[in-house]
Amino acid sequence: MSYNAIFNNPMNEQNSPNQHKRKRKTLKRLLLTDLFLIGLFLCIFALFHHVIPIRYHKIDFEPAFEVNSDANPGDKFASRFSNGETILTQNLYRTESVRVQLTAVQKDGITYYLEDIHIRNIRDLRSAFAEDMYGKSVRDWTLSIAASHHAIAAINGDNYGLGNNQSAVIRNGILFRDRADGDVLVLFSDGIMKIIPEDLFDGNKLIQEGAYQAWNFGPSLLKEGKALKIFESRINKKNPRTAIGYFEPGHYCFVVVDGRQAGYSDGMTMVELSALFESLGCELAYNLDGGKTSVMTFQDRVVNKPFAGGRETTDIIYISE
Amino acid sequence: MKYFERILPHICIILSGMLLVFFVIDRFNQKMGFMENEGTKFIIFVLSISSVITSILLIQFQRKE
């Protein structure tokens, strides 16, 4: 029956106003029921998609290699380290193998925090999963994960355990997930960081080549140390950001930009973040999960002001001795 | 069979509504993978089947008229 036939049905004309009213009410009730069911099924979907934790299986159970403690990429920064004593202030942590300098910058309505990191041995730059469990939707607060791993400095990671399960996961020398979703940031055991394009990512081969960490969120923020002017990302608006930068083996930085807080910090676009890393002199920089997730810790305290109090994450990147 | 015929259009409405929500969220946050999820693929599959059956029933009904 066509719509015309339905709405011009002579039977309809014969219906009393009461019947019309009743039919309209029934239709309204049916549509409201459908709407309610849409909401209900969305909640059930969300529950399975990103609320109920599911433990994954690792691919390898032991690191494919030992991080060579003789090959210390950070040896050339000897003057940055202490002579054996531990120097601890509000914004500096300095020992004979690690130096983390925290800086807060407030400029042009944007507040960001920079942790300038020098490490003697690459094994001091580590990753940790929430509850030490590799899985889907297994989450915890960045500070809590950092504290449980005695982190000197930490930032949220790439939130590997949420979303489409397509991201590459190599953590502390162990290959957990051999897939890639866009460009992957790989840290090798000799301290070199590289961006590996999605189509060239081969977890097993990279592990053989000494891949120590692989984070997969993106995008990559620099090209040969130069800022990018165009990003094809849909999340290019001003937002809270977390990113990691690489200067040279043994020298890295964590950056967290606060955002969505008028009067304090609006956040950064990808272009602004890219320009920031160029100005810092990084060779390479990579965007990690941002928004409410963006959190930086230093010596067991959150140093930034996460939007709406922040939220739990599935993994962190941290410095520890 | 009658009951099945009656609920089919509602299945289409509910699943389409869910997919519309996923589509909008996916525009904002692609990383969450709402459109690439296995569950979403299943919803698309069920919606397609429901739509085909609903359409066949509607065509059959129109021809009877």
Image (cartoon, coloured by chain):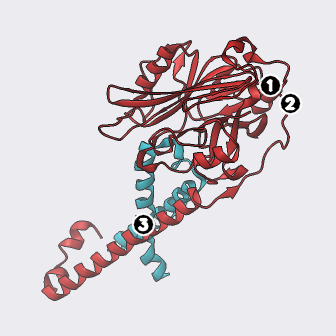
Q: Residues within 10 Å of mark 2 (few under 14, many from 20)?
A: some
Please provide percent x and percent y for residue A222: 52, 18
- Numbered disc 1: what chain? A
Q: Which mark is residue A314?
A: none
The picture's colour for chain A is red
Q: Which residue is mark 3?
A: A39
Q: Amino acid at mark 1?
A: Gly
Q: Write down the quadrant of residue A167 in the picture.
A: top right
Location of mark 1 (residue): A210
Q: Left of A20 or right of it: where is A290?
A: right
- The three-letter code of the residue at mark 2 reads Phe
Distance between mark 2 and mark 1 Cα atoms: 7 Å
Q: Are marks 2 and 1 in contact (CB under 8 Å)?
A: yes
Displayed quadrant of residue A214 = top right
* Foreground disc of the pair 3, 1: 1
Q: Quadrant of the C terminus of chain A?
A: top right
Q: Which residue is mark 2?
A: A65
Q: Position of residue A227 (x, y in %)?
A: 47, 16
Name the quadrant of the N terminus of chain A: bottom left
The colour with which the image depicts chain B is cyan
Q: Looking at this view, is A264 or A247 the one in front? A: A264
Residue A136 lies, in percent from the top left, at 65, 52
Q: Is residue A166 visible?
A: no
SS at badge 2: loop
Residue type of the residue flagged with mark 3 = Gly
Q: CA distance from mark 3 to mark 1?
A: 47 Å
